[in-house]
């Protein structure tokens, strides 16, 4: 069994699309034949079940696992169309059990195993904005962080602060994903008409990367149609995303996370 790679998907700022990135990145990796577990740690505003379209299938949360009311396998929900590859360990309203380092270690040990090894290739932990203690606890079991930012100055500053905190937590491996980039679609087309937009957008991207000072893993273009698809629990594997730059962006990020070199903006 391969080593399970555990990553936190995070930013100190809310509203930058952490859950959207987490859900679709999980789907992109599952489409590549990997077995992926998503853990929703936003206890106040959990949304992964909605984005994955499994809200009616959730019976338990990891708080039930921690309290001994069910096993981790019973609490997990598989995603329709990806039943053997993409799973959610949902959150819930916090009770007396807190999500501290010991809780994360317990959950990790409780996950289904095969030949004494975790059955998942990847575990992604979706964290809320502004909850430093929870992020610190999640970081205790993670080996890498994906920091999500938009190109807004407030999000960029939050990305900087998050990177500093995670370095203190002992996660030196951090990568930046720029989400909802307004001119992002121009990078996936190469006509002369788009050239000027590409020049201006490239400068804006350079400014973000230079400020945050993290390796750029990917750029996800803004797409208003995605909102409607998300409201219906549709992930990037659905035909609604066919030939969309939004789809290409996640495919490229997934490939790079599998330690493959692909250009940021390839459409192949």
Image (cartoon, grey):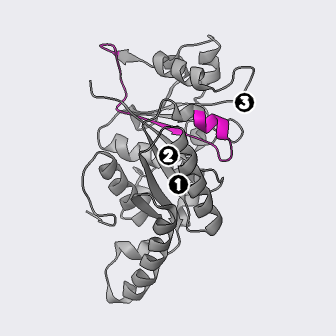
Left or right, 206 with reference to 16: left
Q: Disc 1 vs disc 3: which is toward the camera?
A: 1
Residue placed most toward the observer, 45 or 154: 154
Q: Nearer the viewer, mark 1 or mark 2?
A: 1
Q: Which residues are magenta?
A: 114-136
Q: Work out which residue is located at the far right of the displayed protein and give it.
A: 96
User: What residue does disc 2 label?
Assistant: 22
| Residue 41 falls within the magenta-colored stretch | no
In the rendered structure, does residue 119 fall within the stretch colored magenta? yes
The correct choice, above or below, for 23 with respect to 193 in the image is above
| Number of other residues with Cα within 10 Å of mark 1, as a class: few under 14, some 14 to 19, many 20 or more | many
Lower sequence index among marks 1 and 2: 2
Question: Marks 2 and 3, how far apart in space?
Answer: 20 Å
Checking the image for residue 93, the label placed there is 3
Query: N-terminal of the two: label 2 or label 3?
Result: 2
Sequence-wise first label, 1 or 3: 3
Circle 1 is placed at which residue position? 148
């Amino acid at each position: 069994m391969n080593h399970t790679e555990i990553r936190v998907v995070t930013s100190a700022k809310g509203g930058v699309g952490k859950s959207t990135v987490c859900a679709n990145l999980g789907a992109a990796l599952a489409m590549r034949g990997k077995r992926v577990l998503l853990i929703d740690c936003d206890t106040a505003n959990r949304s992964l079940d909605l984005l994955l379209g499994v809200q009616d299938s959730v019976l338990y949360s990891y708080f039930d696992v921690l309290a001994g009311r069910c096993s981790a396998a019973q609490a997990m929900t598989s995603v329709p169309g990806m039943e053997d590859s993409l799973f959610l360990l949902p959150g819930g309203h916090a009770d007396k059990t807190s999500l501290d380092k010991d809780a994360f270690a317990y959950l990790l040990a409780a996950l289904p195993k095969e030949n004494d090894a975790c059955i998942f290739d990847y575990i992604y932990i979706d964290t809320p904005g502004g909850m430093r203690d929870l992020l610190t606890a999640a970081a205790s079991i993670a080996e890498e962080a994906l920091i999500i930012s938009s190109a807004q100055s407030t999000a960029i500053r939050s990305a900087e602060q998050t990177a500093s905190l995670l370095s203190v937590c002992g996660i030196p491996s951090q990568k930046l994903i720029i989400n909802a980039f307004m001119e992002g679609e121009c990078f996936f087309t190469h006509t002369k008409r788009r050239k000027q937009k590409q020049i201006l957008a490239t400068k804006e991207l350079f400014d973000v990367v230079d400020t945050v000072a993290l390796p750029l893993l990917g750029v996800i273009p803004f797409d208003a149609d995605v909102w409607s698809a998300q409201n219906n629990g549709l992930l990037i594997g659905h035909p609604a995303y066919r030939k969309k730059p939004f789809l290409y962006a996640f495919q490229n990020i997934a490939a790079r996370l599998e330690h493959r070199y692909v250009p940021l903006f390839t459409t192949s």
